[in-house]
Amino acid sequence: MKASNSQWKALLADRVPEQMAAELDVFENEIALKKQGKIEDRVFAETRLRRGAYGQRYDNGQRSDGTATRTLNYPSTMTKGPMTLWDAPGMQRIKIPFGGLNAAQLEMLADLCEEYSDNIAHVTTRQDIQLHFIHIEDTPALMRRLASVGITTREACGNSVRNVTACPIAGVCRDQTFDVTPYANAITYFLLGHPDVQSFGRKFKIAFSGCRENACGLVRLHDFGAIAVTREEDGKTRRGFELWVGGGLGPVPQQARLYDEFVPEEEILPISQAIARVFARLGEKKNRNTARLKFLVSKLGIEEFRKLVSAEREILPYDSRWTDFLKDIPGYSEEALKPPSLLQIGPAHPDGFDRWYAANVYRQRQQGYATVTIALPLGDITAAQLRLVADVSRKYMKETVRSTVEQNIVLRWVSESDLPALYTDLKSVDLATPIAGTIADVSSCPGTDTCKLGIASSRGLAGELRIRLASKNAELDEAIGGLRIKVSGCFNSCGQHHVADLGFYGVSRNKNGYTVPHFQVLLGGEWANNAGSYGLAIGAVPSKRIPETVDRITGRYRAERLEGETFQAFIKRIGKAECKKMIEEFTAVPPHEQDPSFYSDWGDPREFNIGDIGVGECAGEVVSPIDFELVACEREVFEAQLQLDGGNIEKAARMAYESMLHGAQALLKYKFLLAPENANRIVDEFRTNFYDTEIFFDPFVRGKFAQDFFRAHDDAGQARTAETAHQLIEEAQLFIEACYSCYARMSAAPVKVTA
Amino acid sequence: MIDPDSIQHINLKVFVENPEAFVLADAVAVFHRWIRDSVCPEMLIDVADYAHVAAGPGLLLIGHEANYSFDNRENRLGLLYNRKAALDGDFRSRLEQAHRAARAACDRLESELGPVRFDRNTLEVFVNDRLLAPNTEETWDALRPGLEEYFSGSSIRRTGEPRDLFRVSVKKP
C-alpha cells in the first residue's frame, strides 16, 4: 500500500469534479467500514466491482506450484468478497468511453501503471484499460488521480452498464453514415450512475457502429447495439440508429435481434432507458448464468420485448438530457493540429516505413489525413511508451487518440506528410510493428495469467502465435495475412473467439493420467458485418500443437481456395467434417516421459492442472473407459453441428441432447461402474449424485451446466428452431466440457495443502 | 521541504553485465521455484512475463511487500527490487534494505541461473511515488546527502525527465 495515499485527496481537491469526489469519499468509507467488519463480503464485492476493482487469480489464497497446492500466507486473513482475501492483489478496470484518450490521460495512466501496478497498462477487448496486481487500499487514491483527468472507473465491472464501445475510426471512417462518437459519449454519461441501471441481474454492454458492413463496432454481439443510419423525410435527412438487442458471447453466444430499423437520434437515450428498466424489472436476478439481456429477449420473444419497451417508453418521465446533447452535434468534430498534406513520394522514407504504411495506416475520409494504428503486443503498453504516445499526440495531432477492441491504439488526424516522422518516433520505442489488422495481430483475454476463470494460457498462446506469424507475415499472401485470430482462456469469450476466422478457447483434457491444456478450435466466425456470424467448435487440440494447427488450416486455405473465396466461404464449402479431419492428427498427446512439454502451458513451466489440483493419483498408462465415452460425447455434439448445418434441426437437437445424456451417463459409470440406460433414470441419478452434492459444480458458474442438461431433458422432443437448436448445441458442448472438468476433479489426488 | 525520512517505496536496480549470455525465459522457472520454496523474506505470489514488450518490465516476481524483476526499461536489463510496502526506520535504513534485498536476489540468481552476472557497482535508485518524491531539484537536494553518504566513493547523478520517477544512477569506480 502506498504511503502517500492519504495525501492525494487534499492535493487534487480542486481538480476532481464534485460529484466524483463525493462518490470516491463514499467508496473510501466503505473500505474503512469493511475493515471494521461492518459490511458483508457479498455486498462489498459488488461495491468494489462497481468501481472496477476486480479479483485476480489466486485471490482465494491457494496457488498450485505444479506439484501441490499451497497456501499463500497473506498478512491479513480479512476478506474483500466471498473467498477473496483482502491483501490479494486485484485488477483495476478503467473505463474509456469509445476508447477516447487525450495526452494528459495517457500520462496519468503511465504514472499509475508505474506506481501501483507492474509498469504495464493493458488495453482490453472492450476499449478499457486494465492495471493488474493492485492493492485494494490503493484504489481510492488511484481513482482520484484518474478523476483529476476526467476518467471514471464507476460501473466498469459488476452488474452495470459497462464501457460503451464504438468504432475507433468513427468520424474519420470512409464508410460511415455519420460519426457515432457524440452519441456514444452522450449515452455513457446519461446512463452512468442512472437509478434505472442500478438493479440489473447482470452486466449490460453497449456498442455503436458507423456502418453495417464493417466490423469496428461489433454491434451484433452486444446487449444494445446501434448502427448509424439515415432516412429521408420531407426532403430532409434524418439521423437515427438501426437498433439491435440481446446479443452476447459467453458460454451461450447469441446474435442480437433487430429491435427497430430506425430509432431517431432523439429517441436513442430514452429507448436505452426504457430497455434498462425492462431489463431491471424482468431480467433474471437469482441465476446469474441466465441473467443477461439475451436470455430475457429469448424468453419473451422480440415482439413481446418490443411491446414492453414501447410501453415503458410511453410512461418515462421527460428528461431534458435525452436531447440536450443534440444541439452540439452539428458542430461536433475533432480538429487537426496541422493542415492536410500528402505523403511525399520523392524523399527516401525511413527503413521499414513502406511495410508499416501498408499495414498500419488508414487514409481518412478527410483528404490529406491518416489514422495510424499502433499494434500492441497482447494489448500491453509500458509507461514510457504511453508517454511517447502522449508526446506524439501533441506533436502531430490535437491529442486525438483512441483504444480499440482489437487491443490496439489509434492516432487520428495525422497530416500525411508527417507520417515518416511519426513512424520514426514510434519506432524509437518499438511501437511501429507493421502488423495491424493482420493474422499476426492476435488478440487475447488475460486467461490464466491473471484471470480467476482462465483454464488455459490464452496470452501464452497468443504471444507464441504472434511471434511465429509476425516473422513470416510479410511473405503471407493477402488472403492469409488478413485473417483474424482471437484467443480466450475459457468459454466465457472475453477474447471474442466466436467472431474470429480462427478462434480458440481454453479447455482441459485428461490424457495419460495427467491434465493437459487444450484449446477448442472454432472456425468461420465473422468479424465483418458487425460480427455477422459466430464460429462453431470443431474439436480440442493440445495447447502446444495449436501453432501447427494454424499452419495446417491456413495452408489448406491458401492451397485450395477458389478465386475471391473468403475464409468463411471456404470453411462452409469444405464442411465441418473435413475441418475436423484437418485437425485430427494434432490431437494426440505423447506420453509424459516422451515429451513433458505437452503437460505444461505456454510460458509457464509448472505442470498444468485445473483448480489448483495436483496430478491425479490414477496417473498411469491405463485409459479409463470414461475417456473414450467423453470423446464419443464430443463427437456426438460435433455431429449435431453437422446436422444443423445440413438443415436437420430436429436431428441436431436430439443428438445434442443425447450427447449430454451420454456425458452424464459416463460420469455415473465412472463413479458407480454401472449406470442406467433409461433417460429419466440417468437424469435422476445424475441430479442426486452430481448436482445435489455439487460435485459437478463449476467453481464459478456453479450448477449452470447441469441446469442446462435438466432443461434439455425437460424439453426433449419439443420442436426447435435453428436458433434454439444452435443454442442447445452450444450448451451441450459446454456440458461435455463440464463433464471433463468434473472427471478431472474426481480423478485427481486430494488437494495437498501445504503452508 | 522534503523530509528524507518520509520517503518510502525505494527501488533499486542492479544491472546485468552479460545480458547476451542467458535466456530470460529460463528465469521463469527460477522465479516459480522461489515462490514454492519461499526463499525471500517477502511473501511471493506470482510470476508475470512481459518479455514480449520492448524496453519494458521484463519478467516480474510479484510479491506482497515487494516485487523482484528482471527489468528491461530503456533496454538495460537488471535486477529491480521494487519495495511496495512501507517500512519503519529512516531513509538510510530503507535504502539499505532495498540494496540488501537486491543484492541477495542477484547472488541467488547467479547461483541458480547459470551464466548471468550482475555489475554490483552500477546501480539505479528510484522512488516509486511521485507525490513523496517528484523528479525535481528539490527532491534531489533533499535526498542527495543521504545517497552520497550511503554510496560513498560512488558517482551519483539524477537522471530522467520531470515526468519520470525520481531516479539516480550510481556508479562505483
Image (cartoon, coloured by chain):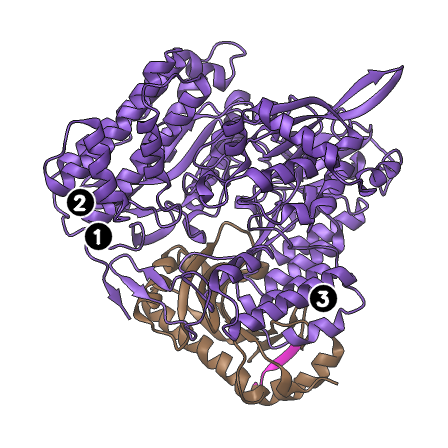
Kind of residue sitting beneath label 1: Val
Which residues make up the magenta segment? B151-157
Please state which amino acid type lies under the numbered disc 2. Answer: Gly
Q: Mark 3 points at which residue?
A: B161
Q: In this view, does A578 lie above or below A713?
A: above
Label 2, on which residue? A513
The chain shown in purple is which?
Answer: A
Residue A424: name its quadrant: top right
Residue at the image point whose x is 29% and y is 20% from the top: A655
Label 2 Cα neighbours within 10 Å, binned few <14 / some 14-19 / many ≥20: many
Task: Say which chain tag 2 marks.
Answer: A
Chain B hue?
brown
- Determine crowd level at label 3: few under 14, some 14-19, many 20+ residues with C-alpha closer than 10 A: few
Would you name the residue on which mark 1 appears?
A: A615
Give the total number of marks visible in the rendering. 3
Position in image of residue B153 (x %, y %): 58, 87
Q: Is residue A313 magenta?
A: no
Q: Is residue A264 something one can see in this rendering?
A: yes
Q: Considering the numbered disc 1 on the image, is that residue within a helix, a strand or a loop?
A: loop
Between the residue at mark 1 and the residue at mark 2, the CA separation in whole angstroms equals 8 Å
Of residue A663 and residue A295, the one placed in the foreground of this image is A295
- Mark yes or no: residue A630 visible: no
Query: Contact, CB < 8 Å: mark 1 with mark 2?
Result: yes
Q: What chain does badge 1 belong to? A: A
